[in-house]
Image: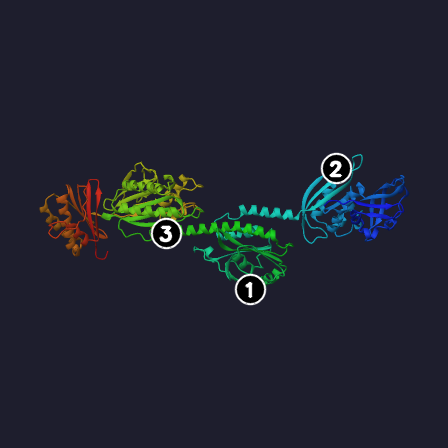
Amino acid sequence: MERVAAAAIIDAQGRVAGWSEGARLLTGRTAQEVVGRPATDLLAEDVPPDTLAAQAGTLVLRHRDGRRVELALTACPVLGPDGAPTGYVVTADPLVPAAAELAAQAFQQASMSMSVFDLQQRYLRVNDAACHVMGVPEEALVGRFYPETVEDAEHSRGFLRHLRQVAETGRPLRYESFTSAPALTREHAWSIEMWPLRDASGEPTAVALAAFDSSEQYWARRRLALLNEAATGIGTTLDVVRTAEELVELLVPQYADFASVDLLDWVLGADEPPMIPDGRVQLRRVAHGSTRTGNPGAALKLGETHVYEPTSPPARALCEGRAVLAHAGEPAFVQWVAERNERSPEGRPYRQGVHSMIAVPLRARGTALGVAVFVRMAHPDDYGPDDAVFAEELGSRAAVCVDNARRFARERSTAHALQHSLLPRGLPGQAAVDVAHRYLPCGSLAGIGGDWFDVIPLSGSRVGLVVGDVVGHGIRSSATMGRLRTAVRTLADVDLPPDELLTHLDDLVSHLASDDSGEEVAELGATCLYAVYDPVSRRLCVAAAGHPAPVVVLPGDTPGFVAMAAGPPLGVGGLPFEATELELPEGSVVALYTDGLIEDRDRDVDRATEELRRALGAPADSLEALGDNVLKAVMPEQPTDDVALLLVRTRALGADRVATWDVPPDPAQVAHFRQAATERLATWGLDEATFVTELVVSELVTNAIRYGEPPIKLRLIRDRALICEVSDGSSTSPHLRRAHVYDEGGRGLLLVAQLTQRWGSRQTAFGKTIWAEQPLPGA
């Protein structure tokens, strides 16, 4: 605002002849009140003679409201025609205090607490702000020793040490403190600076200090520090309940005397998020904490549900999507406390003094998950707007962690269910081997892996044994595992040898890795081991694709690993797989497993494989007991990968259950072999199967003679089913075709298919084998 000059005109008789606006502002008197009156009427005291002579100086006027106004005046004479003064023009300015007086006023009126102590820590001066903090006037402090004016506490002793340090060293000091004060009801944060006062010779004579109340800045820093702690302290595990507990542990007691986290029920399950109702809300308590041991003031027990009314702060926070503040005396707060007391009367004494609360929604990715409630009792400050902003930010971060844990739990549950549905629940009936199996999903945060196993019945009483492991974890790995398991079953159904089957499976994995996402093949790699056991020849043929070799335990012998080529993992492409054959006595045990059983980042592989070998060699009452023993001896306490274990004990079909004939390429011999088959069935007591068997033998032998090449063999196998096999030297496989009305042939295989349970063909090293199975009575 522009300053207006204070001026007046005094005539030769000493009366006021003119009065400026500045003069009115300075004295509060208008021109109508002053003009024409003697100027002396405005004075509060006499004018010193030297002022009149010098026409300049200081004088005191009486303000219109009665107070004294000290002014610095300058008078300029107005001369008449004869040169004599006819009046004076007087200008005035408020008197500027002396520098020392200004400094004293600045000290006394400073907004921060300021004090001066002598070198023995006695009060010399105390300003108004310091008197307010101490709760006594300056006169009650001056001359007294500092410790006599405060309580005997650590912060007081620290203050005294700092005063002495400055007095003794003569060096200034600055520090921060969070303490109470005699006249303040709660603790404050102070930024304190102390410095020595020196005389003209430079010697310290006193110690001055200034204490700035930095409580607002302190709490702002504390809120930022809590947010930083939340970044590392919340969400350390992918567990919903543990994440909620970490939020509570972060807030109590630093920010709240009580805190709780209530979640919607669907968050703890695998359901899709429902619409949030606009009225009453049902929430489940998953975590709470208090400054009192045992949480005696909690109205809900962990795991309990409660329906919050629409007007309650938690329901409002959830429905409005913002933090809701409530304080003692407000209707919503009173009703909320009353509901707590009604639900849990035994906790009423522990709720005394509750004065402030915040209910903050836990929302992540646009979805409401629950509500967190912070309550203050012993803490003197009410929650304010800044706290609401902080609570929303903290709630947002915690909600993301809760949602991550929820998504992980849901994906893990889905992957587990998917994998469980893909793994064999009950292994198919077959007579070649006795089987025991174990599957253990890992407990790591990576999730369910892609391990699998299978037992596949093959033609000729043979059985296919497979274990595999898809790289990675989660739903994608489980789905890929399902596709590979289906592919193995399909390839096994056409009786491919183990090395050829792995070659086709390798191509499939390469295609899966490159078809959709364009990822590197190695990112969708897998390992697999496939073996075929023939109980007639008692031979095991096995091939591996980057998979650990199986362990074989021969009767009466020590366990040993099969010496075989590991082969490249599936998905590498272009590299061959080698099959290894070995003959096994009846009763041999073969252990197939995935690498999770022996490999772990904290274990030595050689030691683990030796433990596996010893465990398989230990006596056991059954295969099931042996499987349990292996897991107890070899498995780590916290496996980081899935484990699949498949144990098989071999059986053998003796010569009394197998009949083989060499067939000459002469159609006239068909009747002879038909009769030979009939006689063997009679020996086995299978007369009921004679009619169908004669027809099957006749058709298959005739086709082999007519369309195949020598050598031709006929074989009957009595197992759980009656199997008829005809082998020849041609690799051309037969197929069903529709015979027309006047065709003389083409109906043989159709009849075989209709009369038997199943039939098929498989390639051999010397040609092919056509086989057909028919069920036996009571099998």
Residue highlighted by disc 2: 170
Residue 633 is tagged as none
Q: CA distance from mark 1 to mark 3?
A: 43 Å
- Give the CA separation, mark 2 to mark 1: 63 Å
Which residue is under mark 3?
420
Relative horizontal placement of residue 103, taking residue 555 as reference (left or right): right
Disc 2: CA contacts within 10 A as few (<14), some (14-19) or many (>=20):
some
Q: Which residue is mark 1?
A: 343
Give above or below for 280 relative to 588.
Answer: below
Left or right side of 452 for 430: left
Residue 670 position in % (x across, y down): 11, 48
Which residue: 80% across, 37% down? 199
Q: How many marks?
A: 3
Q: Nearer the viewer, residue 13 or 364?
A: 13
Residue 753 appears in the figure: yes
Q: Residues within 10 Å of mark 3 (few under 14, many from 20)?
A: some
Residue lying farthest to the front in this orientation = 81
Q: Percent x, y for residue 451?
A: 37, 46
Q: Nearer the viewer, mark 3 or mark 2?
A: 2
Three-letter residue code for mark 1:
Arg
Disc nearer the start of the sequence (1/3): 1
Looking at the image, tell me whether mark 3 or mark 2 is earlier in sequence order: 2
Badge 1 local density, few (<14 within 10 Å), some, or many (20+)? some
Alpha-carbon distance for marks 3 and 2? 78 Å
